[in-house]
Image (cartoon, rainbow, N blue to C red):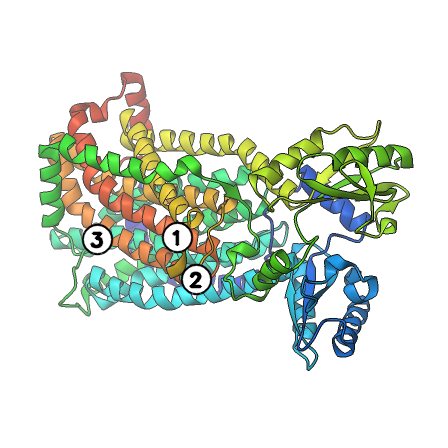
Amino acid sequence: MLYRYGTFIHRRARLVLVLAALALTLCTALGIGAFGQLKGGGFNDPHAEATRAEQVIDTQFGGRTNLVFLLHATTGTVDTPAAAATGRTLAQHLSGEPGVDAVVSYWTSNAPALRSHDDTQAIVAVHVTGDDDQSTTRAKQLIVRYAVPSAAATIQAGGGAAASVDINDQVTTSLLRAEAIAVPLTTILLLFVFGSLVAALLPLLVGTIAIMGTFAELYLVGSVTSVSEFSINMTTALGLGLGIDYSLLLVSRFREQLAQGQPVPEALAATVASAGRTVLFAAATVASALTSLLVFPQYFLRSFAYAGIGVVLISAATALLVLPALLSVLGTRVNKGKIPWSAAATRGGESRIWRRTTTAVQRRPARYAVPAVLLLLFLALPLTHAQLGTPDQGVLPKDTSSRQVSDRLAADFSGQGDQVDVVTTTAVPPTALGAYARSLSQLPGVLAVDSSTGSFRDGTPTTPSLDPTTLGRPHAQRLVLSTSLAAKSPAAQDLVAKVRAVSGPAGVDRLVGGPDADLVDTSASIGAHLPYAALIIIASTLLLLFAFTGSLLQPLRALLFNALTLSGTAGVLVWMFQDGHGGGALAFTARPMDMSMLILFLCIAFGLSMDYEVFLISRIKELHDRGMPTAEAVTTGLARTGRIVSAAAALLAVSLLAFAAGTVSFLQMFGIGAGLAIVLDATLVRAVLLPAALRILGDANWYCPAPLRRLHRRIALAEA
């Protein structure tokens, strides 16, 4: 069927290219609008208890403070006339801003918690209304307007909304910086790998179509549901990477067929029937891995499924439709503009390095495989003490405004520590509310509890630190627990569980929220959905690899190798980003691993590793089906395809590792993790473990019971 399809593309090549140009124009027009549809945030489960508590606080109590203006007196203290006038004017102007409520100022409340220990700094705190995207946009406008120096004081902005503004700005800067590094290096590598100027331009065209097509898809999806702005990063990196991968495979096979003396029509049809089938299957494996992200309720993760599945399918469609049409029109001119110093990985023939390496490994498989496995297990050891977290100011560089404000609040102020919120959704009798607040104040780690009926410390009444009138409503109550614990620490998460375990007033529904509760609920949500995601990945891999190879053992071996690669890579990420190794060189702060980004990295790295698995095993299976003994098929298959995998891995790793030059730590973690996983997969796994395992298994590699063998013949997904 694919051979006939290749023949059809050859006959209609120019028509296909005209239609592709029109489609690219339309996708570009739609794709430009995608940037206005995308949103920030999306890290929390919308159905979690902490999220619902946040909604009650927003609607009933004016919202939790999410934007802080830190005023530092130029001379003297914040009580000097000039500094005080600046602070009062700032608070007055903020009170009149649309979308701003719950303005609290040191100069209007005289609360000690809003003034620094040395009296040189003070706070104006506000709540910016709206969802994550709206509050970030409004906060940016307020920061530009009011976070400006004056003769009396300097003013900096901090808080969650300011951190979101800085993260968005830093992500944009990081993406531009990564592209400035990756694009020139990728262009040079493309010339080196493809060996000719004309051939090197083909993957760039495939990648461009995939990227613009996915932008158009994100515009349409973003019109009906929430899509994270970070999906843009996924689109650009994967679009270019997969364009290179699929182009390498197809152009290499096309050149090989031409070198054998076949005319262009037959060479194109044979290329589509063999390498095209591999691309089709490889895309299915990557897309199925990314489909697992759809099970998570956080739209941050779901957005990467929308972008990832789209870019994979569009890349494959472009490689199977537009690229064959281009090859048909170019014919032997695909070799025009030859680069004499290139590696010419796509000109066909065999790689002596891969043949020698494979021969050596197959001669003594255990001697090479055991150290490789032990190395990957050693790299995975840091996973034993991994801690999980969610994004905050800690992902930003230390010289960022919101990060500096956060650090100063922690070091120079009292009463600005961690807080836990408890809200009720019904009225509570004052006596019952007071008894509940008294019980909560006696929990270990709780400094005080503020409520509308009074404040308590260790079970006894104390001076309120918050205005009691702001904590009570006719049909809702809010209790604020001030703690001595580090935010998002294991002890703070344990406190959330203890607060939820304390019996509340009889017949009253209550919700526990706050940053620590967000982390607890996010961990629980991801943990609850992770088995379903893993089941999708495992089941789809087993089914697709069986359909491709007709073997029962190959899918299991592939899963095992991927597990080793991902475990080793994740261990390195913990060693770096949690334990702090490399923080000085890359300018990041050691902190717990970001859960959402870790899940994203695992899914994408798994899919890309399966890409290379399919590239190599397809050629080995093809040669074996033609009658070659398994050992010879492995050696010849890797000699012919191994350098394509090496080239594809190098090109994609450059695009991903370029994110290490960014300034947001979770983007650095993703880029380094995905890039390192590709390098480990293309070296230790594909060059050592794969030939060693295939040599040890021998003819058992292709074992399949008779009924399943008949089923496999019917679906026939292996290369022709």
Residue depicted at 73% across the width and 57% down the height: 113
User: How far from the left and from the top, in percent, is residue 631?
Assistant: 12, 32
Front residue (pair 535, 573): 573
Helix, strand or loop at mark 2: loop
Which residue carries the number 1 mark?
A: 315
Q: Nearer the viewer, mark 1 or mark 2?
A: 2
Helix, strand or loop at mark 3: helix
Which residue carries the number 2 mark?
A: 662
Q: Which residue type carries mark 1?
A: Ser
Q: To which quarter of the image does residue 709 belong?
A: top left
Which residue carries the number 3 mark?
A: 252
Q: Which of marks 1 and 2 is nearer the N terminus?
A: 1
- Distance from the alpha carbon under mark 1 to that under mark 2: 26 Å
Helix, strand or loop at mark 1: helix
Q: Which of marks 1 and 3 is nearer the N terminus?
A: 3
Q: Which of marks 2 and 3 is nearer the N terminus?
A: 3
Q: Is residue 200 left or right of residue 628?
A: right
Q: From where the camera sits, is residue 98 visible?
A: no
Q: From where the camera sits, is residue 467 visible?
A: yes
Q: Which mark is residue 224?
A: none
User: How far from the left and from the top, in percent, is residue 618?
Assistant: 24, 38
Q: Is residue 204 left or right of residue 438?
A: left
Q: To which quarter of the image does residue 335 belong?
A: bottom left
